[in-house]
Image (tube, rainbow, N blue to C red):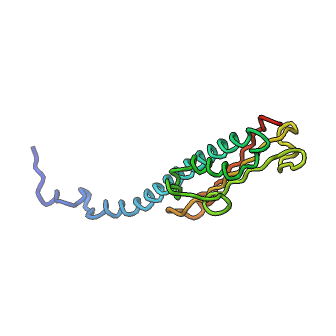
Amino acid sequence: MKQHPSSTIQQGRNPRGGKRDGVAMVEFGMTSVVVFLMLLVTFDFGIYASSFLAIQNASRVAALRNSGGLESADDQATACSLAIEQMRGLPGIDASFTSDCSSGLVVVTSELCDADSPCAEGAGGFDSDPSVKVVVRYTLPDLFHLPNVGPGVIARATHAKVRAIS
């Protein structure tokens, strides 16, 4: 069995003759920036997806409640409180968050759509019957908001037919 002389196999040397000390650190430094940015984009996407689902649910709950009758169709205060309850846990909306929903982080509007006051989609929305339109807007706070990656405001509009007309 032939033995290799100790001069050809040394710590930190490539068998082909070139030095490789520190190459792994340089490779790690070059790829870590890309991996870190991908991690931030993934985190931002999770915030956007979670916020969109919460806002969609908030507008649905507020529209369902305000569609109970003509007298409750434009009840802004109740629609606001229901929407905020559904959005608890989103960034900026903790247990102590309160708002009148006219401006700021959360904006909620509720309106009655009928033949006398049509919404943007046309008179009555559904077969010319009275309906309720609730719009919930949520302004995302800047966490690590990367430029040109996602929206700054998420909005959702929900229509519901008024159930009790009297």
Residue 93 placement, left or right of 17: right
Q: In which quarter of the image is the N terminus?
A: top left
Residue 6 placement, left or right of 103: left
Q: 159 or 25: nearer the eye?
A: 159
Q: Quadrant of the C terminus?
A: top right
Residue 111: percent from the left, percent from the top? Answer: 77, 50
Residue 113: percent from the left, percent from the top? Answer: 82, 46
The residue at 27%/62% (across/down) is 20
Image: 104 above or below 125: below
Q: 39 or 92: nearer the eye?
A: 92
Residue 138: percent from the left, percent from the top? Answer: 62, 56
The residue at 77%/35% (across/down) is 163
Q: How many marks?
A: 0
Q: 84 or 15: nearer the eye?
A: 84
Residue 73 placement, left or right of 7: right
Q: Which corner quadrant of the image does residue 19 belong to?
A: bottom left
Judged from this view, the residue extending furthest toward the top is: 163
Residue 49: percent from the left, percent from the top? Answer: 57, 48
The residue at 10%/49% (across/down) is 3
